[in-house]
Amino acid sequence: MTKPHNISYNWIKRNEISRCNLCLKRDKLTWDHIPPKDGGVQSKVIIESLFSNRTGKQTSEGQIESQNGFKIRSICKKYNNTWLGKYYDPTLNEFARHVSNILQSKLLRPEVLEIPTKPNRLIRAVIGHLVASKIKYDRCTSDHLFRRCFFDMDSPILEDVNVFFWIHPHSETIIIRDTVMPRRRGDFLQNMLCHVLKYYPVGFLVTTADSYEGLSSLTKFRNSEPDEINSLRISIKNRRPSDWPERVDNGNFVMGGYALSRSTIAKPKTTKQ
Ligand SMILES: [Zn+2]
């Protein structure tokens, strides 16, 4: 990656009438927000290519500004407002708020939090936003599997879909799709296909691997009923840097195609910028 990835509004804004990433029908498209509405602070952000950001090649021409957090116009109103907005996002938002409240509390915190939630809906919220996060609708295998999981909350999450989570106490929102990384850091013989969605205060990794770096699994509840409540254990002691797990170092690489090249970071806009 030697050239900066200049981005413009077509990075996040598809034609108003186009094919919906979720239901694949042509319709009027609406904005998907990450974090979802009511799920976090939707402040002024600067959006740019993750690769330009990480290689230090970002330019002001390669950045776009959003008044209300990261957003992308990619899904129809029905699936935005009803499926994500009513069925799944309330669970994701409540989970994020719960973690955030504990992190910001001045009271003594345990090293491992136990957060009650509905894993069935939480998993589908994460998957839905990952599908929505592509500027081009995609019929690739991952998106096909994700759509099958998304639309059928009465069936278990498919075996090839594993979701892990960790504390992301950083202000950057980062979305990475369709990348290959080593299954274990430092071991380049076995790799995994994965996707990352992270924003304050939680990160999610969706992958073909059945474990990753000791992270807590969300899909151990893959058979749970839509309204079944389980406690998720999440360590606040082992904090990861903002660029984890995708950081390229002696033990890790990232490899991918178009979707990876469109990976995005949104940072709060400060008065200096
Ligand atoms: Zn749709």
Image (cartoon, rainbow, N blue to C red):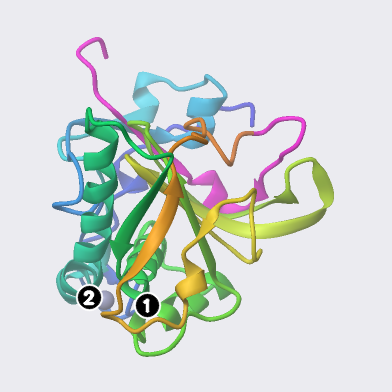
Residue toward you, 108 or 255: 108
Q: Is residue 214 left or right of residue 134?
A: right
102 and 7: which one is in front?
Answer: 102
Query: Per the image, is 157 magenta?
Result: no
Vertical order, 125 against 73 (above or below):
below
Along the line of sight, the residue nearer the viewer: 20 or 158: 158
Which residue, given by chain and number where applicable, does mark 1 sit on? Answer: 150
Residue 212, given in percent of the width and then of the height, sits at: 64, 54
Tell me: residue 52, above or below residue 145: above
Q: Are marks 2 and 1 in contact (CB under 8 Å)?
A: yes
Residue lying at 37% horizontally and 56% vertically, measured from the top left:
133
The residue labelled by disc 2 is: 83
Start-end of magenta stretch? 248-273
Residue 135, percent from left and from top: 38, 56
Give amino acid for label 1.
Answer: Phe
Q: Earlier in the sequence, mark 2 or mark 1?
A: 2
Q: Residue at x 39, y 33 (%)?
A: 48
Residue furthest to the right? 189
Q: Position of residue 87 (x, y in %)?
A: 21, 75
Q: Three-letter amino acid code at disc 2?
A: Trp
